[in-house]
């Protein structure tokens, strides 16, 4: 090593601790800002300047306060408000099923195939269970289930969808209960998207 290299090596050794300190330093936070503003408030004498410092502290505290999330809320029970939201979602998703002639055509097929009818009903239930309890749109808690087993929200959503399908299809002349097999099949078909809409309408914010 030459003599000219010695100063460079000493400079690097002298700079090394400074690099370590800067690397280990943490980023300032809103809490640090609030502490600095509190210290500044104690030493400021002018009334107007102290008022401005306090306003800055309030703004900093607002920034530090976490905003409530529209998702992940704890949800219990199933009241009239939930019924109204479920009904709205059911109608929005179900209107196409009430005006399309294909609904009764599929209903006639399901009426003649009980296994497919039952399978469609089970798929509807599973979809609603997935939306309410698996998708985690909200933190849904089971509260006072019917018969100690059936969750109120699940029964409510399915009940609203079934009611909307029966009333809508009957009122608009899409089904005739003189042929109960076709009427039941059509109701099950229409209730599937209505149940999805009811579950989403109940849980999603807005």
Image (spheres, rainbow, N blue to C red):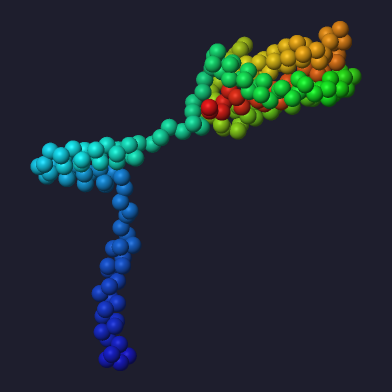
**Residue at x-position 73% and y-position 20%:** 191
Quarter-wise, where is residue 184 in the image? top right
Quarter-wise, where is residue 138 in the image? top right
In this view, the residue farthest toward the bottom is 2
Residue 6: image x %, image y %?
27, 86
The front one of 51 and 11 is 51
Number of disc labels: 0
The front one of 134 and 33 is 33
Horizontally, is 12 left or right of 47 in the view?
Answer: right
In this view, the residue farthest toward the left is 45
Residue 74: image x %, image y %?
49, 26
Horizontally, is 1 left or right of 97 in the view?
Answer: left
Residue 47: image x %, image y %?
12, 38
Is 34 rendered above or below residue 200?
Answer: below
**Residue at x-position 65% and y-position 30%:** 130
Is residue 178 among the parts visible in the rendering?
A: yes
Is 130 rendered above or below residue 27?
Answer: above
Quarter-wise, where is residue 63 in the image? top left
Residue 176: image x %, image y %?
84, 10
Is residue 154 among the parts visible in the rendering?
A: no
The front one of 185 and 121 is 185
**Residue at x-position 61% and y-position 31%:** 134
Horizontally, is 149 left or right of 74 in the view?
Answer: right
In this view, the residue farthest toward the right is 112
């Amino acid at each position: 090593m030459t003599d000219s290299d010695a100063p460079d090596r000493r400079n690097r050794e002298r700079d090394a601790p400074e690099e370590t300190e800067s690397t280990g330093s943490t980023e300032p936070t809103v809490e640090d800002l609030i502490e600095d503003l509190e210290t500044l408030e104690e030493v400021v004498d002018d009334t107007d300047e102290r008022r401005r410092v306090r306003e800055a502290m309030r703004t900093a505290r607002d920034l530090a306060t976490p905003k409530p999330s529209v998702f992940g809320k704890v949800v219990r029970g199933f009241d009239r408000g939930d019924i109204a939201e479920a009904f709205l979602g059911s109608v929005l998703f179900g209107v196409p099923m009430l005006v399309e002639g294909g609904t009764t055509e599929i209903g006639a097929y399901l009426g003649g195939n009980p296994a497919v009818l039952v399978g469609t009903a089970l798929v509807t239930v599973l979809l609603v269970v997935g939306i309410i309890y698996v998708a985690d749109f909200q933190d849904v808690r089971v509260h006072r289930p019917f018969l100690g087993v059936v969750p109120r929200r699940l029964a409510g959503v399915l009940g609203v969808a079934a009611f909307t399908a029966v009333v809508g299809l009957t009122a608009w002349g899409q089904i005739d209960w003189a042929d109960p097999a076709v009427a039941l099949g059509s109701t099950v078909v229409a209730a599937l998207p209505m149940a999805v809409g009811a579950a989403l309408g109940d849980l999603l914010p807005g």
